[in-house]
Image (tube, helix red, strand yellow):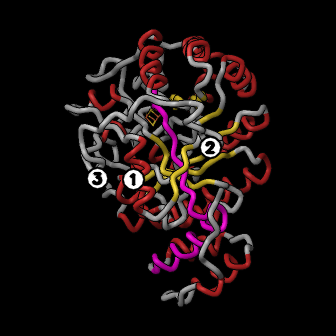
Amino acid sequence: MATKTQLTAQSAPAFQDAKLEPVAKKVLAGERLNSADGLALYESHDLLGVGWLANFVREKRHGNVTYFNVNRHINPTNVCVAHCKLCAFGRSPDSPGAYTFALDEIWQRAGEGAAEGATEFHIVGGLHPDLSFEYYLELIRGLKQRFPQVHLKAFTMVEVGYYARISKLSIRDTLLAMKAAGVDSLPGGGAEIFHPRVRKIICDHKVSGQMWLQIARTAHEIGLRSNATMLYGHIETNEERVDHLVQLRDSQDKTHGFVAFIPLAFHPANTGLSHIPSPTGFDDLKAIACSRLLLDNFDHIKAYWIMLTPRIAQVALRFGANDLDGTVVEEKIYHDAGATTPEHMTRAELERLIRAAGRVPVERDTLYNPVDREKMPIPPARVSSRSIDGFIPETSLTLNI
Ligand code: SF4
């Protein structure tokens, strides 16, 4: 399916940053980069040079093909005991805006998504102090029973660690119970930055970085694949970014269970770190490119438009990304944030962005199998009530992606 890349080692540009030359040699020869190479990439201001290399790798793997999916986000509750400094989503139970859906309500919302042709429900939420593990298992069972055709990508490693704690089960047994209930794979959120110095400041009540990796490893061992993420643009150093990526790569060498990597741009508004400036466009493109170059054993790098903005996500398709994520939609969160109209990226809008970047859109399922809409027709695309360049409320930026 992938159209062949036009790029060759001979067409490599003259790099403005001489420190990129030895890294480029390795990339063009298909050799693995080490941490020092990763640091050279992150520290270089030759963004076009770094981007060219990432695009070279991207096109070698995927040609012009760019994936997207039709999905629906479901956030069962925003009540959370963790109070991470990095988060604008979690609330105390009695805070204004705190909500918890009844299971019927979740199934009804999921039904709307299924009717719109969603192939995936992406389910993440807060660590609620009173909901039992059984509530989540019942949620999954109910979804699987009603919508057996939809892939259930549910619960981050952070949530799994919390369910294990409240149910007094081992991590493995917790994951086995989730799998038996109908979970098909896990999202990649909650990884943030693995280094303990950073975690202590931005999310000290969450599972440690090592525990996150261990839960992912256990999930992969029992046949549940997952994504992986990195939250960048807050207090982390370039060394800590590279360390995060190399730890993910080491883990992937062992299990091959990660499907896609998603760099997540930090959004400081309404968080305990609101004094920190947002990452710049330069940071965003660098994050995509460096992850494409360092994560040589990950098939897919995703430009998550809801955090990057559609414009940057589109440009990222020429800086190493081969996926734009999906239609997303979680109306409750947008309404809670005071939005007056629904935020929605239609299938047609995603395709337009991809085509305008000179790429070929391919709708995929969660595990990157192409979706044949002749066999799975969907109703005519809903027309978005606002432009894709429109406002995305800050509290939609759930960090347990
Ligand atoms: S990032 Fe996740 S765990 Fe932390 S407060 Fe927000 S919802 Fe809770």
For the image, the number of numbered tags is: 3
Label 3 beta carbon less than 8 Å to ligand 1: no
| Residue 262 seen | no
Pick the residue in front: 93 or 204.
93
Rendered location of residue 158, percent (x, y): 57, 34
Residue at 35 percent across and 49 percent down: it is 267
Residue under numbered circle 3: 275
Q: Earlier in the sequence, mark 3 or mark 2?
A: 3
Compute the Cα span from label 1 to label 2.
18 Å
Does the magenta segment cover residue 82?
A: no
To which residue does mark 2 refer?
370
From the top left corner, tell me how far across and down residue 255 is, in percent: 78, 46
Tell me the CA gap for discs 3 and 2: 43 Å
Quickly name the residue at label 1: 352
Q: Is residue 205 left or right of residue 274?
A: right
Q: Residue at x 28, y 32 (%)?
A: 342
- Three-letter code for the amino acid on which mark 1 is drawn: Arg
Whether residue 5 is visible to the viewer of this picture, yes or no, is: yes
Residue drawn at x 57%, y 29% is: 154
Residue type of the residue flagged with mark 2: Pro
Q: Which residues are drawn in magenta?
A: 46-74
Q: Residue 249: x percent and y percent?
A: 69, 56
> CA separation, marks 3 and 1?
36 Å
Q: Nearer the viewer, mark 3 or mark 1?
A: 1
Q: Provide the secondary structure element on which disc 2 rests.
A: loop
Q: Earlier in the sequence, mark 1 or mark 2?
A: 1
Q: In which quadrant will I find the N terminus?
A: bottom right
**Which is more foreground, mark 3 or mark 2?**
2
